[in-house]
Amino acid sequence: MSAEAAYRAIELAFGAPETLAATATLSAEQRDALRQFWIGRASGELTTALSFEFILADLQQLSAPSALTELAERAIADEHRHVDWCLRFAELWGDGQPAQAELGGTRPLTFEGANERDMRLLRTVFGCCFSETVAVHVLLASQAEIKLESMARLNRQHVAEEVGHSRLGWALVAWPGLSARDRGLIAEFVPLMTRVTRALWCGPERAADAALHELGYLSLPLVQKACDVAFETVILPGLERNQIRL
Ligand SMILES: [Fe+2]
Ligand SMILES: [Fe+2]
């Protein structure tokens, strides 16, 4: 299914009576937890959209192949659409109260001790091989719990798009334009990028709630488990396979 067709189906399911009816079974506290969660998520998506703008500029400066810059361009548009949908769900669970996303930062990430070119490499590796790869695993874990059709469709589409975003990082580390020295540099920063990724994803202490998991809520236990799976099965082996050895 194309992205356009997927979003048409999401829109249809969002407008179906089943979606609105789901709010009736929730307590005021649960609705508020969902509203806050989706606002936070929208803010994360907005911050990620800006990170991809920095990544796009970095890739252009690195003279990376156009296949990579195109992935970055697509990611910017995808993340903005994620913001819009997160806000729509925030408003749904919040009884129609308007919701707004806020940027979590306005400057490119920096890595102490790295020069300007190194930082351009590290930002894509961190954003895509680390954070977006974790995103794929977190959303997949959530997909297994979701029961509401509109959310299941939205989450499935977000997974597909996050896979594309993580691929950008994996394409960069597979690029022959990276030297042995570049790979050694990335390896040096793996422990730091691992800590920052875990801190970013496992920050909010949201308790597990089966009823909320069915609606796409990401509790801390769900996120932590998915994060472990991402590191063990994809991130660390994927780096190793691309001669980035710890
Ligand atoms: Fe996203
Ligand atoms: Fe993403």
Image (tube, rainbow, N blue to C red):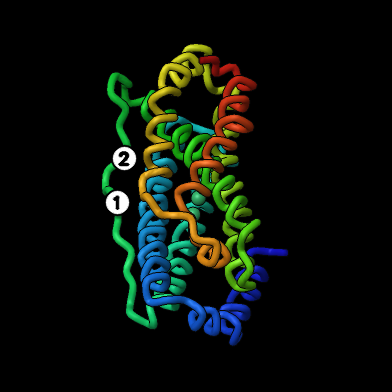
Q: CA distance from mark 2 to mark 1?
A: 11 Å
Q: Which residue is mark 1?
A: 104
Q: Could you tell me residue 90's position as x and y percent?
A: 41, 71
- Binning the other alpha carbons within 10 Å of mark 2 as few (below 14), some (14 to 19) or many (20 upward) gives some
Dot 2 and dot 1 residues touching (CB under 8 Å): no
Against 10, residue 103 (above or below) is above
Image quadrant where one finds the N terminus: bottom right
Determine whether, in the image, residue 190 is placed left or right of residue 158.
Answer: left
- 43 and 195: which one is in front? 195
The picture places residue 91, in percent across and down from the top left corner, at 40, 76
Element under disc 2: loop
Residue 227, horizontal then vertical, whole percent: 52, 39
Residue 241, disc: none
Q: Which mark is in front, 2 or 1? A: 1
Q: Residues within 10 Å of mark 1 (few under 14, many from 20)?
A: some
Which one is nearer the viewer's eye here, 165 or 62?
Answer: 165
Tell whether 2 sits left or right of 173: right
Say which of 6 and 115 sits in front: 6
Can the viewer see residue 149? yes
Q: Nearer the viewer, residue 74 or 205?
A: 205
Res 32 → quadrant? bottom left
Q: Is mark 2 within 8 Å of ligand 2?
A: no
In the picture provided, is 191 more to the left or to the right than 238?
Answer: left
Mark number displayed over residue 108: 2
Q: Position of residue 77 (x, y in %)?
A: 48, 58
Q: Residue at x 58, y 33 (%)?
A: 170
In the rendered structure, which amino acid carries the disc numbered 1?
Answer: Gly
Q: Under tag 1, what secondary structure?
A: loop
Give the residue at x 62% y 25%: 237
Tell me which amino acid carries mark 2: Pro
